[in-house]
Amino acid sequence: MKKRNLQNPKRRLIRGASWAIALTLIAAAAYLFFLVPDATSTLNEIHEPIAREVSVKRPEKVVLKEKPPISFLLLGVDEREDDRGRSDTMIVLTLNPKEHSIKMVSIPRDTYTEIVGYGIQDKINHAYAFGGVMMSMESVENLLDIPIDYAVQVNMEGFQDIVDAVGGVTVDSPIAFEDFKAGEQTINGEQALRYVKMRKQDPNGDFGRQDRQKQVIKSIMEKTASANTLVNYKKIFNALGDNVKMSISFGELMDIQKNYRGTIQTIDQIHFEKGTGVTIDNIWYYKMNPHELESVQRKLKEHLEIK
């Protein structure tokens, strides 16, 4: 099978924002359900099941009431007309309710790896274009050697709708850049996109960007959980319904809200930073450092309490 060339995006992609939306969904949407009956229809609307019962890496179905550690794949998708698009943000979260913690690792979108079910080696973000959410899940499972229990797909262009729906977010920028001043400020959805996206002007590079992303998570969660936000609950649900799809059923989301909400207390970020760039057939790829990959696999397995 020949390798397809997916090198020419039709518009600039927005990366790094999807995990803020997905964490907000997991930690806060169910909370609002108990206060606002209209949430039921929205959470049913965004449920999009996948065509498999269990992962090959975890042969037994997860029973959320027993509170096992679980994992999510967050896909920030660049959707296009007449085209499935690509997942240019791919983030794995593992949640351990015993340790009250989340581990988060962002997979470089150009990572050269096997596309499971397609029979080629290619950039991992192309898995979504070739086979949608399930092929993305199985390719990530193969790369990280862990089960992926659930997937959350976010339309990147809709991120600002969610921020605007909660009335903007408050951040404390450590540096001044573009039209952002250093210090605390409240920003709208369009500004939030630029705030979580900027990397080149930050002396800490991608690590600085991740710190800014964490600020946006915290602010969205605080806004979503506040009584004032309930006034705009229909805007929030409309934003979620228009821009988020998840493999989690309504009942599963309720169990996660009940049994895993404490995991948000600690978010540990794991970084891939020792890989190298390689060019194959005039296409640039990110090739992971095998020792670093093995270390990340081990940390995630320990957090998931699997061998």
Image: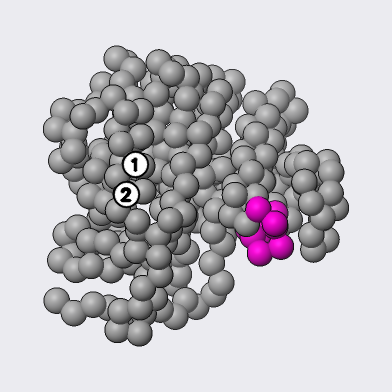
Compared across the picture, whether 223 is left or right of 243 comes to: right
Residue in the picture at 35% in, 34% down: 299
Residue 204: x and y, percent?
65, 53
Q: Secondary structure at mark 2?
A: helix
Q: Inspect the magenta stretch and tell me whether residue 200 lies in it.
A: yes
Q: Looking at the picture, which amino acid does disc 2 mark? A: His
Q: Which residue is mark 2?
A: 291
Q: Residue at x 64, y 44 (%)?
A: 211
Q: Tell me the amino acid under the disc marked 1.
A: Ser
Dots 2, 1 in contact, CB < 8 A:
yes
Neighbor class of circle 1 (other Cα within 10 Å; few <14, some 14-19, many 20+) is few
- The residue identified by callout 1 is 295
Q: Which residue ends up furthest to the bottom in the rendered image?
A: 282
Q: Horizontal and vertical percent for residue 49? A: 29, 43
Q: Residue furthest front?
A: 291
Q: Is residue 145 above or below residue 118?
A: above
